[in-house]
Image (tube, rainbow, N blue to C red):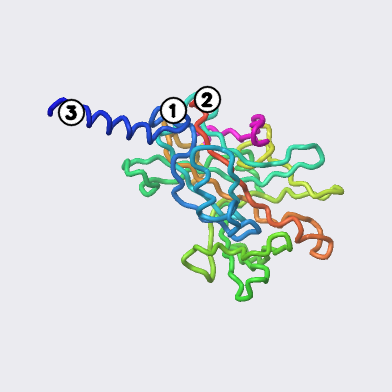
Amino acid sequence: MKNNKYTALFICLAAALVSCKKNDEPAGTSRYVHTVLEYKPAPGQFINEQNAGTPQAAQALIGGTSSLLSLGSFGGYVIVGFDHSIENAEGADIGIYGNPNTGAGTEWSEPGIVFVMEDKNGNGLPDDGEWYELAGSEHTNPATIKNYRITYYNPKNKTDDLTWKDSRGKQGRVLRNTFHPQEYYPLWLPDQDSVSFTGTLLPPSLRSEGLNTNPPFAWGYADSGSEEFLGFRSEYGRGYNAFDISWAIDKTGKRVDLKRVDFVRIMTAQNSNGSTGSEADGGRQVGEISTEVSGVVDLHIPNNE
């Protein structure tokens, strides 16, 4: 009986370990997202679409890089965690997959700022530490606005554009278009009247040179075809931007020394409709600038696919 009990225990433990594996990797060493802790997008043309803008779509980030999640307009974000801490080692530490267009004359980036946090109390939740921004190339740009706040209002007529007001006294609209007829305000948010976001606002970069383009900033942003955009995954036609935990800064802009992080937050960082033209000239055909994410990886763990 004793031997049988130990045999049964061994089988149960082995089954538990197998259930935690992804792509035959040992438990605790997956390079991919292990959990999606929060998805709070701002309004946008892909929000509430099943495969790109719902809580279920956010869960598809787990375990790979083949999905595509929209964060909506400025401030929208997703928070992900891993089955281990990501170490601040030599070189780039985190890769974030997106879908920018890098072709000459057709460049299209939708830059997202990245934040990191350490799980200091070890409970698996981002509830006990400060979010540290990974400062990119525009951090010291005078046109970058820190502590920018915006509030979006859900229209009573769900086919109307969504209006917004910001902390600079400006107002504007998230324009609807005929390609995405669903509601643009996130249906699962508890407050269905308005939603607010605060963060760093990057300067506009939209250009009109025959075609509308949104060229990338030099480095340090997700969904950006910048010099840190390291190649493409041939099976998905996407690549990733690389990030160094050593870029972390606190709320005062001071560099912080982080040994490791456990959570990553990605936030849309521009407030812009995606066309320089008027609405009559097709200004509502492109939709808002909205960061897209198709995966987050620990670059220190090899890709064995």
The earlier-in-sequence mark between 1 and 2 is: 1
Is 47 covered by the magenta stretch?
A: no
Q: Is residue 12 left or right of residue 55?
A: left
| Residue beneath disc 3 | 4
Q: Count the numbered circles shown.
A: 3
Apparent side of residue 184 relative to residue 251 in the rendered image (left or right): right
Q: Which mark is residue 304?
A: 2
User: x and y percent of residue 44 in the render?
Assistant: 63, 59
| Residue 295, quarter of picture | top right
Give the distance between the C-alpha atoms of the residues marked 3 and 2, in whole angstroms. Answer: 37 Å
Give above or below for 19 relative to 187: above
- Local secondary structure at mark 1: loop
Question: What percent of the width, then of the height, locates residue 68?
Answer: 60, 46
Residue at image point 57% right, 51% down: 146
* Picture coordinates of residue 95, whole percent (x, y): 56, 34
CB-based contact (under 8 Å), mark 1 and mark 2:
yes
User: Tag 3, which secondary structure?
Assistant: helix
**Magenta residues, as a range?**
229-247
Work out how far the residue at label 1 is from the one at label 3, CA to CA, in angstroms: 29 Å
| Residue 248 screen position, x and y as percent | 50, 38
The residue most toward the bottom is 156
Which secondary structure type mostly characterizes the magenta part of the structure? loop
Q: Amino acid at mark 2?
A: Asn
- The residue at the point 81 percent across, 62 percent down is 278
Q: Amino acid at mark 1?
A: Glu
Position of residue 110 in the picture relative to residue 299 (left or right) = right
Residue 237 is inside the magenta segment? yes
Measure the alpha-carbon separation of dots 1 and 2.
9 Å
Q: Earlier in the sequence, mark 1 or mark 3?
A: 3
164 lies above or below 240: below
The residue at which mark 1 appears reads as 25
